[in-house]
């Protein structure tokens, strides 16, 4: 059946401001675009936009889909402003003897001005409690959780991680980066049925936000990779396009897994460093507010080299978490020695802190930069103290990256930040902290449309409203501009030509 979408502004996102009157769709593909008069006689059915604006389907290029779904159901610690209220709320949710996990606490927004420690949680003596920091690069465990994990003050730091201690050398319950696995590996494994429920809740919520798909990384945190993968296969269907990055720990195991039109397999995911909020992002110079601390390297250079070589062995690209400038330098050294396969681009995720030299080196390489506009309102103003004003010239430099010609895609990093792409676009265009890095509305929308498509080599079939492209659309109640992002509402989300979300009037 040929369906004609018309009666509202339809933005192709091919060039800034370009509109068409009508789009003809059949079997999940765009057959033709043009005027309503040209296409009307070809249509079997008409869907009137009734004045609403249509865009290519929004895609979040960096999210943790399962984590987003879990955030919808558990206690969201990011909403609390004090340790006392967090502890009180957690105490009301725990079941005696059962592991309790929640996430989202942010010491930069707590009135106490410090991280939560095991002392804060130790009134819950018989229940193992684990609370992950908002960045997911730090967690706090209470004494019961550490006891069950066999952690003592003599336990050595693992490679790429730090076990936190107080000024007397006693455990404070904080675990940084790879050290977190000492605790999380003891949490009982989830089931496929549980993950099915979480994935469905996540997808339903994301569709309501206008998202037609995501690039997500979930394969190494829920037992064997087959457990979350089977949950995805049983849940996704044809209503959401899911691009799965493969964590380096399961990358080789996943070779041979067959993709579908809606579940794709992407690059090897590697972490180089941690987060600025947790002082674990890897910097070339000390943190301005923590002399002597340059952050944490998750892997040594030899292991990183072996991981890149493994990806290249399978003719694959890499997707690398790099927040600090030293982390970027380390991965550029490797990419220069072991180039991406012909026709593919490596993905550098976050790139919060850069230097002019790093930009010049990146410009010579086939890379896509995954950026998160929501990091700016989330990280400022406290990040100024972390970095100092001099480093801000090349920090969160979204406009500079676009002006230099880099391919950039837009993501949320939910559950760390809010998954609403309209809020991400607003953050990109209304940047009170770094006004010289503000994007235009077209550039901001491009991050979540054409940019996300380019990140996975799908720019010829996704991200635009053109003949031959996938019929994935996001329909909002008004034209999106710098002033309207935060007031606009998603009315419909269309995937593969089918309406998967329809706002009730």
Image (spheres, rainbow, N blue to C red):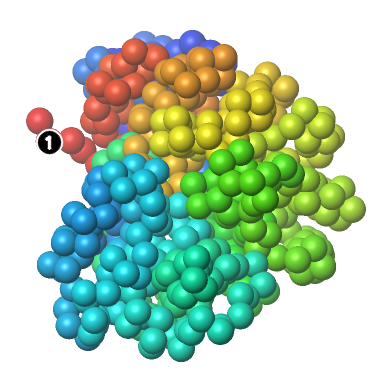
In the shown orientation, is residue 11 left or right of residue 406?
Answer: left
**Image coordinates for residue 84, horizontal then vertical, percent:** 21, 56
Figure check: 14 above or below 188? above
Residue 370, picture quadrant: top right
**Residue 211 or residue 305, whichever sits in front:** 305
What residue do we see at 67% from left, 72% from top?
159
Q: Is residue 344 visible?
A: no
Q: Position of residue 434 (x, y in %)?
A: 52, 20
Answer few, some or many: residues within 10 Å of disc 1's Cα (few below 14, many 20 plus, some between 14 and 19): few
Q: Which quarter of the figure is the C terminus placed in?
A: top left
**Snapshot quadrant of residue 323:** top right
Q: Position of residue 76 (x, y in %)?
A: 26, 54
Indicate the quadrant containing the N terminus: top left, top right, bottom left or bottom right. Answer: top left
Number of numbered discs: 1
The percent coordinates of residue 478 (x first, y second) are 28, 17
Residue sitting nearer the eye, 304 or 490: 304
In the depicted view, which residue is nearer to us: 86 or 66? 86
Q: Residue at x 75, y 66 (%)?
A: 300
The residue furthest front is: 168
Q: Which residue shows up at 23% across the image and 85% down it? A: 126
Residue at numbered disc 1: 504
Q: Is residue 293 visible?
A: yes
* Image quadrant in which you'd find residue 409: top right
**Callout 1: SS:** loop
Residue found 47% across the figure and 84% down from its top: 151
Is residue 342 depicted above or below 139 in this figure?
above
């Amino acid at each position: 059946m040929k369906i004609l979408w018309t009666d509202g502004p339809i933005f192709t996102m091919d060039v800034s401001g370009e509109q068409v009157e009508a789009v003809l769709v059949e079997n999940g593909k765009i057959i033709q675009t043009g005027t309503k008069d040209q296409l009307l006689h070809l249509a079997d059915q008409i869907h009137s936009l009734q004045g609403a604006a249509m865009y290519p389907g929004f895609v979040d290029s960096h999210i943790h889909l399962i984590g987003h779904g879990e955030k919808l159901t558990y206690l969201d610690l990011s909403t609390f402003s004090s340790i006392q209220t967090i502890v009180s709320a957690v105490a009301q949710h725990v079941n005696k003897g059962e592991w309790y996990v929640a996430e989202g606490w942010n010491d930069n927004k707590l009135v106490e001005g410090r991280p939560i420690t095991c002392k804060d949680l130790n009134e819950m003596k018989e229940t193992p409690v684990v609370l992950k920091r908002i960045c997911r690069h730090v967690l706090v465990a209470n004494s019961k959780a550490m006891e069950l994990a066999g952690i003592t003050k003599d336990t050595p730091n693992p490679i790429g991680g730090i076990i936190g201690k107080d000024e007397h050398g006693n455990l404070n319950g904080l675990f940084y980066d790879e050290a977190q696995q000492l605790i999380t590996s003891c949490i009982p494994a989830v089931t496929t049925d549980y993950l099915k429920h979480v994935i469905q809740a996540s997808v339903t919520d994301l569709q309501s936000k206008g998202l037609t798909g995501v690039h997500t990384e979930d394969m190494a945190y829920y037992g064997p990779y087959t457990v979350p993968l089977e949950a995805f296969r049983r849940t996704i269907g044809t209503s959401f396009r899911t691009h799965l990055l493969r964590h380096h720990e399961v990358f080789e195991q996943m070779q041979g897994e067959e993709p579908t039109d809606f579940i794709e397999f992407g690059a090897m995911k590697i972490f180089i460093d941690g987060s600025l909020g947790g002082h674990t992002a890897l910097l070339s110079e000390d943190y301005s507010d923590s002399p002597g601390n340059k952050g944490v390297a998750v892997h040594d250079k030899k292991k990183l080299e072996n991981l890149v070589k493994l990806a290249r062995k399978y003719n694959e690209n890499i997707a690398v978490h790099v927040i600090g400038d030293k982390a970027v330098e380390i991965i550029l050294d490797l990419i220069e020695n072991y180039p991406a396969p012909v026709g593919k681009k490596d993905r550098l995720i976050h790139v919060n802190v850069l230097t002019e030299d790093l930009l010049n080196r990146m410009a010579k390489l086939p890379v896509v930069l995954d950026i998160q506009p929501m990091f700016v309102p989330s990280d400022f103003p406290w990040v100024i103290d972390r970095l100092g004003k001099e480093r801000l010239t090349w920090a969160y430099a979204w406009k500079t990256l676009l002006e230099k010609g880099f391919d950039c895609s837009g993501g949320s990093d939910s559950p760390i930040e809010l998954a609403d792409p309209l809020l991400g676009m607003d953050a990109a265009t209304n940047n009170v902290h770094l006004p010289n890095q503000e994007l235009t509305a077209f550039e901001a929308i491009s991050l979540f449309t054409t940019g996300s498509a380019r990140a996975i080599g799908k720019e010829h079939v996704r991200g635009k409203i053109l003949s031959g492209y996938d019929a994935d659309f996001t329909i909002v109640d008004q034209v999106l501009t710098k002033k309207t992002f935060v007031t606009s509402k998603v009315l419909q989300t269309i995937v593969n030509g089918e309406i998967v979300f329809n706002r009730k009037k």
